[in-house]
Amino acid sequence: MNDTAGSPIVGVDFEGNVALVEIRRPPHNFFDIPMIQGLADAFEALDADPRCRAIVLCAQGNSFCAGANFANRDATPPQKSPRAVNPLYFEAIRLVSCAKPVVAAVHGPAIGGGMGLALVADFRVTCAEARFSVNFNRLGFHPGFGLSFTLPRLVGAQQAALLFYTGRRIGGEEALRIGLADMLVEQAQVRAKAVELAAEIAVSSPIAVQSTRATLRAGFVEQFRLAVARESIEQNAHFKTADFAEGVKAMAERRVPRFEGH
């Protein structure tokens, strides 16, 4: 998948039976529909490729994925109706529909929807330098990218609520403690350890692994689909508010937002 400048957004390489799907939009890998579509296309192709038994989702640059770039006017495309699902989330549904296990190599910040992307994976390998944040409420709008379903499923409702309401950033050590990450290693070793874990999974029978994964994730795609439908309705309303405008402005100015509740 290529961006408008002609450079690849998403690359796919193999190490044995492990496929590395790399986001190539450094330094911060801000996402948009073409990027998530490119990832979904790659995942669907790997689902059909018998060489692939596990996937490592990784990224170039300083960040794993810094979410949407709100300095870009296309970051929140207008919807045709208040109940329309964000088209980016249709691509996210394609991602979570992948049948093969995924390990995310989170070497740097995973912010907002970027954290949603990290939670598409079954496992996350990270480092102390990484930063995780679901900063939607701090920006003045409802969480998205299925996080209202995936985050409490992973860390519990109470911890998810704390992260959502405050928008706080946590490092890799805290992420490991609360169950958001599965392995903490040196930053330089994040990708290698993710590949090592994926290779360990790939030794097992692919038929058995995919069947077991389907059992453990029964209803996952359906619940994710319902989550993004509700998230889209809430976001479509919030994007029209003064609070959202203030949240984005405060972020750009690196100050605490002054919300008025309208």
Image: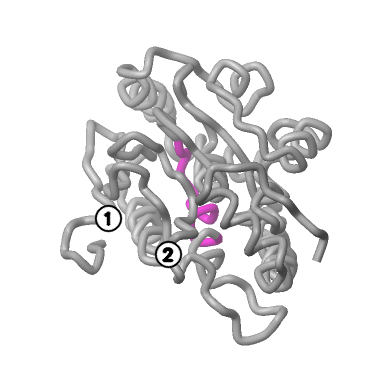
Q: Amino acid at mark 1?
A: Ile
Depth order, front residue of 173/123:
173
Depicted 90 relative to depicted 136: above or below: below
Crowd around label 1: few <14 · some 14–19 · many ≥20 (10 Å): many
The residue positioned 62% from the left and 28% from the top of the image is 180
> Answer yes or no: do the residues labelled 2 and 1 have beta carbons within 8 Å?
no
The residue positioned 37% from the left and 22% from the top of the image is 190
Q: Which residue is mark 1?
A: 9
The residue positioned 63% from the left and 44% from the top of the image is 135
Identify the magenta region: 93-103
Depth order, front residue of 106/28:
28
Depicted 178 relative to depicted 215: above or below: above
Image check: 57 left or right of 165? Answer: left
Q: Is residue 164 magenta?
A: no
Residue 142 in percent (x, y) is at: 71, 57
Looking at this view, name the residue that lies furthest to the top. Answer: 186
Distance, label 2 to label 1, CA atoms, is 17 Å
**Quadrant location of the N terminus in the rendered image:** bottom left
Image check: 244 left or right of 207? Answer: right
Residue 137 in percent (x, y) is at: 71, 50
Q: Which residue is mark 2?
A: 72
Number of the front mark, 2 or 1: 2
Crowd around label 2: few <14 · some 14–19 · many ≥20 (10 Å): few
Q: Amino acid at mark 2?
A: Asn
Looking at this view, name the residue that lies furthest to the bottom. Answer: 80
Mark 1 residue element: loop
Residue 219 in percent (x, y) is at: 70, 53
- Earlier sequence position, callout 2 versus callout 1: 1
